[in-house]
Amino acid sequence: MNSAPQIELAIEALQNQRALLGDVAVDAAIGALRMQLASKESLSEQTLKLTGERKLVTIMFADISGFTSLSEKHDPEEVRALMNACFDCLVPVVNEYAGTIDKFIGDEIIALFGLLKRTSVMPNLLAVRH
């Protein structure tokens, strides 16, 4: 089921089969379908909002300087501990300044400021300098 109308038809069909299938089965199936329907509606609203709005955002790319040579000289567990320690410091700062973490790529973190919450440029720059 890909579209909202198909999900709504499935819900209606399940309602019609309540006497045969029983309340427990029908309620469980309908609950799952309603969650799927809600997520589709939420996603389509988010897509409309994101594609229809221009914003000034700050994008931060941060990585560990000399990481490649460092990772070649240390055990994987030590490298992972170092990366986790760095991310443990960076993530709270991103959150403090209402940033959104886009992704982690190896030793790099990519964060966006001003995407979900409208802010002036100054707090975005302060977050990057933090």
Image: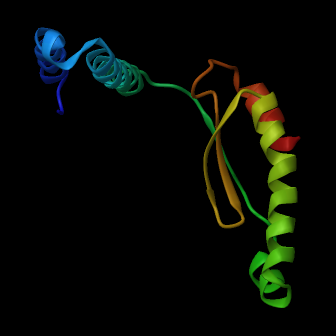
Which residue is rendered at x = 45% and y = 24% of the image?
54
The quarter of the picture where the N terminus appears is top left
Does 78 sit above or below residue 33? Answer: below
Which residue is rendered at x = 32% and y = 25% of the image?
36
On the picture, is 74 further left or further right than 118? right
User: Which quadrant of the view contains residue 119?
Assistant: top right
**Residue 55 position within the rendered picture, expressed as x and y whole percent measured from the top left:** 52, 25
Q: Is residue 105 visible?
A: yes
The quarter of the picture where the C terminus appears is top right
Q: Is residue 66 visible?
A: no
Farthest-out residue, bottom: 73
On the picture, is 9 further left or further right than 40? left
User: Which quadrant of the view contains residue 50?
Assistant: top left
**Closer to the camera, 73 or 26?**
26
Q: How many marks?
A: 0
**Residue 39 position within the rendered picture, expressed as x and y whole percent measured from the top left:** 37, 24
Which residue is rendered at x = 66% and y = 67% of the image?
106
Does 23 sit above or below residue 103? Answer: above
**Closer to the camera, 120 or 11?**
11
User: Which quadrant of the view contains residue 51?
Assistant: top left
Q: According to the image, what is the colour scheme of the structure?
A: rainbow
Which residue is rendered at x = 82% and y = 47% of the image?
90
**Closer to the camera, 71 or 23?**
23
**Residue 46 position within the rendered picture, expressed as x and y whole percent measured from the top left:** 40, 23
On the picture, is 21 further left or further right than 47? left
**Residue 37 position within the rendered picture, expressed as x and y whole percent measured from the top left:** 29, 20
